[in-house]
Image (cartoon, coloured by chain):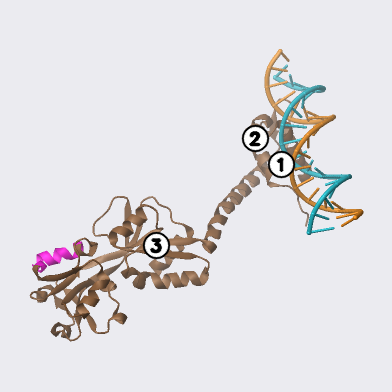
Chain colours: A brown, B cyan, C orange
DNA sequence: GCATAAGGCTGGTTTTCGAA
DNA sequence: TTCGAAAACCAGCCTTATGC
């Protein structure tokens, strides 16, 4: 097979002249002197063995062969440009870093398996997790410290996009020895008269919960409030009362002495999902992991 | 492995030439 | 006369070959 030996610069020069029908304008456009540009075209023509331009001292016009060549070169240059842009993204997939802001309860339920699958295929990717409250997740997404967030929104926030992945219901958390533990479901009214342990007022979870606590007149039954939802099982385990927590926040493996009982009439839930900044573009790594999370 | 020389390539300036 | 392409010449850089 015959090998044609020309370079990228010659093609750029050819397109510049063809698009302007002028060596002078083309030379200015690609920051070259007119003679240098002329020589470049001449060499390309010599390499191809065809005349690409019919030129006089007054006029430069593409030959039919030149016109055909231009069409193909423009397509090729477009593809090359696209390849050059994509190659950065591909490299990023192999050595990139991803930062996820999340509420702790999503780590076990949403993150571990997708991260495991991601690292299996791309072992050099570094994963950074910023776990914290709902507000810290939103703040980390908003200021760009995190590629995306996992959590819930107690109310819509301008500039923040929320895409729900699953529902997380609120449950009662009791000791196995508690009389209420014989139930498979509990109505909110059955919590009247119990000593309740819940999340503090500053938590987004509490804002969701407050609708029922106020409606069922349960606020006065609260004896302990904790800032962290992860503290509630320990308090219940210590015998201080009945906990009310989102189901995903509870890890049964760490508390075999406790039981979760779904609360009904009504079933109260929060939507757990992906939090992104409006107008933000995800990195290839973040996009890949997000796809695995949504499909898990 | 390093230094040096030769050759090739690229791009710049200046000049020439031809057409309008 | 003006404008623009082409030719001539020069300088700088890079690659390759050679000798130590």
Quadrant in which the C terminus of chain A appears = bottom left
Between the C-alphas of marks 3 and 2, the distance is 45 Å
The image quadrant of residue A56 is top right
Residue A87's place in the image compared with A247, above or below, is above
> What segment carries the magenta color?
A207-219
Q: Secondary structure at mark 3?
A: strand
Q: Main secondary structure of the magenta part?
A: helix
**What's the mark number on residue A31?**
2
- Compare residues A8 and A75 and report the one nearer the observer: A8
Place of residue A76 in the rendered image (x, y in percent of width and height, measured from the top left): 63, 49
A127 is within the stretch colored magenta: no
**What's the mark number on residue A65?**
1
Label 1 or label 3, whichever comes before in sequence order: 1
Categorize mark 1 by other alpha carbons within 10 Å: few (<14), some (14-19), many (20+): few
Q: Which residue is mark 3?
A: A100
Labelled pair 1, 2 in contact (Cβ < 8 Å): no
Residue at (52% x, 70% y) in the render: A121
Q: Secondary structure at mark 1?
A: helix
- Same-chain status of marks 1 and 3: yes
Place of residue C4 in the rendered image (x, y in percent of width and height, measured from the top left): 69, 26
Label 3 or label 2, whichever comes before in sequence order: 2
Which chain's residue wears label 1? A
In the displayed structure image, the side of residue A12 where residue A263 appears, left or right: left
Residue A129's place in the image compared with A17, above or below, is below
The image quadrant of residue B7 is top right
């Amino acid at each position: 097979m015959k090998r044609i030996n020309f370079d990228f610069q010659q093609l750029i020069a050819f397109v510049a002249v063809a698009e302007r029908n002028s060596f002078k304008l083309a030379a200015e456009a690609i920051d070259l002197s007119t003679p240098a540009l002329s020589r470049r075209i001449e060499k390309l023509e010599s390499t191809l063995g065809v005349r690409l331009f019919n030129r006089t001292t007054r006029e430069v016009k593409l030959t039919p062969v030149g016109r055909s060549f231009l069409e193909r070169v423009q397509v090729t240059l477009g593809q090359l440009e696209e390849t050059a842009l994509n190659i950065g993204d591909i490299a990023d997939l192999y050595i990139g870093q991803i930062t996820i802001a999340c509420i702790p309860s999503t780590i076990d339920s949403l993150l571990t398996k997708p991260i495991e699958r991601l690292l299996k295929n791309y072992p050099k990717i570094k994963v950074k997790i910023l776990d914290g409250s709902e507000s810290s997740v939103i703040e980390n997404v908003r200021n760009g410290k995190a590629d995306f967030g996992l959590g819930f929104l107690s109310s819509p926030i301008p500039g923040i996009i929320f895409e729900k992945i699953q529902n997380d219901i609120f449950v009662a958390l009791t000791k196995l020895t508690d009389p209420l533990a014989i139930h498979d479901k509990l109505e909110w009214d059955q919590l009247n008269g119990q000593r309740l342990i819940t999340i503090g007022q500053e938590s987004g979870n509490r804002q969701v919960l407050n609708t029922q606590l106020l409606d069922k007149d349960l606020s006065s039954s609260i004896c302990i409030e904790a800032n962290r939802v992860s503290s509630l099982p320990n308090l219940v385990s210590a015998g201080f009362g009945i906990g009310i927590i989102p189901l995903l926040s509870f890890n049964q493996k760490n508390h075999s002495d406790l039981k979760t009982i779904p609360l009904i009439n009504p079933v109260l839930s929060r939507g757990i999902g992906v939090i992104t900044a409006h107008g933000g573009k995800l990195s290839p790594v973040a996009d890949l992991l997000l796809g695995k999370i949504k499909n898990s």
